[in-house]
Amino acid sequence: MPRKANGRADKTERASDNGMPGGAMPSGGGQSANGTPAGNQPTSTSSTGPAMSGSPGPGGYAMSGGGGGASMTGGGGGMTGGGDDRDVEQPTRRECGVMDVHRRLLSTSAEYVAARSALENATALYLASDQRFDGVARIPCVVHVVWNNATQNISQAQIDSQVEVLNRDFRATNTDIGIVPAPFTGLVADPRIEFHLATTDPNGNPTTGVTRTQTTRTSFSTDDAIKSSATGGIDPWPADKYLNIWVGQLGGGLLGYAQFPGGPAETDGVVILHSGFGTNGTAAAPFDLGRTTTHEIGHYLNLFHIWGDDGSGCSGSDEVGDTPNQGGPNFGVPTFPKLSCNNGPNGDLFVNYMDYTDDRGMVMFTNDQVSRMEACLDTVRSSLNQGTGAGAATPEPAGPVVSWGAGRLDAFVVGTDKAMYHKWYDGGWGPSVGGYEYMGGVCMSAPEVASWGPGRLDAFVLGTDHGLYHKWYDGGWGPSVTDYEPLGGVCMSPPRVATWGPDRLDVFVTGTDRALHHIWWNGTAWSGFESLGGVCRGEPEVVAWGTDRLDVFVLGMDSAVYHKWWDGTAWSGFENLGGVCVGSPTAVSWGPNRLDLFAVGTDSALYHKWYDGSSWSADWENLGGVCASAPTVVSWGPGRLDVFVLGTDSALYHQWWDGSAWSAFEYMGGVCVDQPRVTSWAANRLDVFVVGTDSGLYHKWWDGSAWGPSTTEYEALGGVITDFKLDQPAPDKVPADLHSPMQSSVGNRAVMS
Amino acid sequence: MDPALLDGRWTHSSEEDHDGVSVYRREDFAFPPARGRRGVEFRPDGTFVEWLLGRGDAPEAAQPGRWQPTGTVSRVSGAPGRVVAATPDRLEIAWQE
């Protein structure tokens, strides 16, 4: 592998702590190295589930032939989507004075217009799919106190009181919710969003989640000066990880203002008048119940004013279905019913947080407002969510192809020189459609790559010494583009990686003792190898459904699947999930407390077993087919599974679960070798990569409405590849005449036959 | 009325409204906090800008209208108005609606 490993650095590195024999990863004879811990993994075939042989799939599921007949046909959708909203650039600075943030951006930033438009489309798609994340979203906050006189330097108690209000209002547990007039009580909804002051700062250090900055400015306006150190305020913490809340003295009687999702990161967040913040200290009636912050965070999560922002007219909309049409804002505390726009008999929903009443008059969000906020948290603001909900709460699965965010793909392969090569998509393919970035090394396994956040990649391979090697991308490659960090060990399986949160990596391999071994990065340092016991066939499979949770699956010597999990406190023993599998299982989680396992049985049919939070399905479900490759599966959201396998005709087949039923196998064309790879950067988005018989890498994508380039065609991405290993030099490295097999098929029309 | 007195930005001091007249104050006035305050702006080139309640609670400029040195104001949306009193720190407009 890495040249470094085979050269001078090798010996010295091997001498270090994690080095092999005799290191923390035993090659035999070590603690529980051979055999199973306390008999948790029996070697008999007394499976709890039925064996998977002898039950061939129904004829209707057979994967031969080209029909398919599924509905996902249509013209090729382009990949020219809007890209990552967070990447929208700051427009030229405010020549127009104190213009509204939203309007200013709409009028000055084409990117913002596109981002907002894309966001509304994504929201509509999300709502149409009727998804709701399970569990509770948790948002880390930083409160930036910007003060000119000591009174404005509000107390920790005042800050804490505001967080408490948010955690009641966004859980519908506020004690004043009883003032909702009876006709409206059915609209009251729990957004299931919780807030906490950040405990880790952007540098990874412990923090109170509060910054305090003294300023010479006596007050701030809506020009965002409070959001920059250069203008008397304080810069935000990274807006993709923290909700930034600036608190200070505002002029003109302004209580607060917010930036909608899709705007520039440099100004993302909410701004609140100190005397409208929290419930004690400087908070003053009638804005002393913390509702200004609730209202502004509503905007931050994509809610519009309930009257539709058209002055006092009846044509504006808040894009929310279950709120009554309403003329203009309500002030003070109205008396029921308050009529406008012929909305009798019940009139305006003036008790809503997105109206303009006094704090004691606004007490609820509606069901459809909650859906909009959830859509926001599952799409454009998904990186904020540290909770147990879906979206960012279900970590991005690792593999040779990953996506760190909407509009981004990173694919890794190995060339015939055994070096690693990389290409990426960020609106167009880099370094070119058919080209690859050379990343050095001498790799004995296909790259396994994880991403714990936007702009972050961690790649793992085995070296010629069977040691584990690592490299990372955080804006540039470490240790360098072509060097690797040796992590030691003698690994008998390719590494499998999971990340359950920022700056966390968990790598699993089998050792020479065939036991499962684990090494992890805790944000500061690598652990040594930890033996988890067992006797494994093939490579392990690992998935993380949320923070501090790992589920590992291995194939036992009896060909049954065994399961071991980390619950945040301790490792379980091995749980026998039965089955008789011909290869390692593939696992996916669409959210907390959900696991879906796929494996090919001895009859070559696809089998499925799932955990629903309380128990495993009793049997392995036979999904039919005759599989010629291991399955690859991805979930873009709760209740959704997309499985890809090759058929005996070497074509790609696709089967999906839509939350209520399995589709038939969809024929997707091609003549492929090796297991397909798939990733999903957002709901309703799939990117599938296969290797053709010409050993080139091919790509197709589902954009929410159609497959591109078409249901059965592929985009050629160059290379000469087997199993995501290039068997000839990468295109960038070979003479032009060798390009021709690929070059001729560039143009999105190549069919792999 | 001296038209030069009108120049610049004014914020609605709704608490002082009286007799169908809207009262405006300069930015440095000690306004009590409010969910939203509209405003007006008189520009030297005769442009009149009404500042509305913005989508994210910051003021938002309406399509610009015109103002005359006589104190009459026209808007693209909304009835015309007339400045009925102006001092350096206080402005009164009677809107014909």
Image (cartoon, coloured by chain):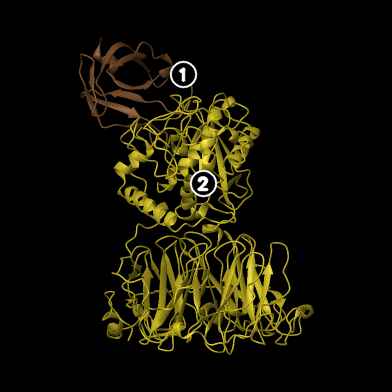
The image shows residue A258 at horizontal and vertical percentages of 45, 38
- Number of numbered discs visible in the structure rendering: 2
Residue A239 seen in render: no
Q: Is residue A558 left or right of residue A369?
A: right
Q: Colour of chain B?
A: brown
Q: Give A144 or B97, whichever is nearer the viewer.
A: B97
| Residue receiving disc 1 | B30
Quadrant housing residue A578: bottom right
The image shows residue A93 at horizontal and vertical percentages of 34, 40
Amino acid type at mark 2: Trp
Quadrant housing residue B71: top left
Residues under labels 1 and 2: Cα distance?
A: 32 Å
Amino acid type at mark 1: Ala
Above or below — where is A662 with respect to A753? above
Q: Give A155 or A536, whichever is nearer the viewer.
A: A536
Above or below — where is A672 with respect to B67? below
| Residue receiving disc 2 | A237
Quadrant housing residue B29: top left
Numbered disc 2: what chain? A
Q: Which chain is yellow?
A: A
Q: Is residue B40 left or right of residue A228?
A: left
Above or below — where is A40 with respect to B41? below
Q: Is residue A312 left or right of residue A197?
A: left
Residue depicted at 31% across the width and 15% down the height: B93
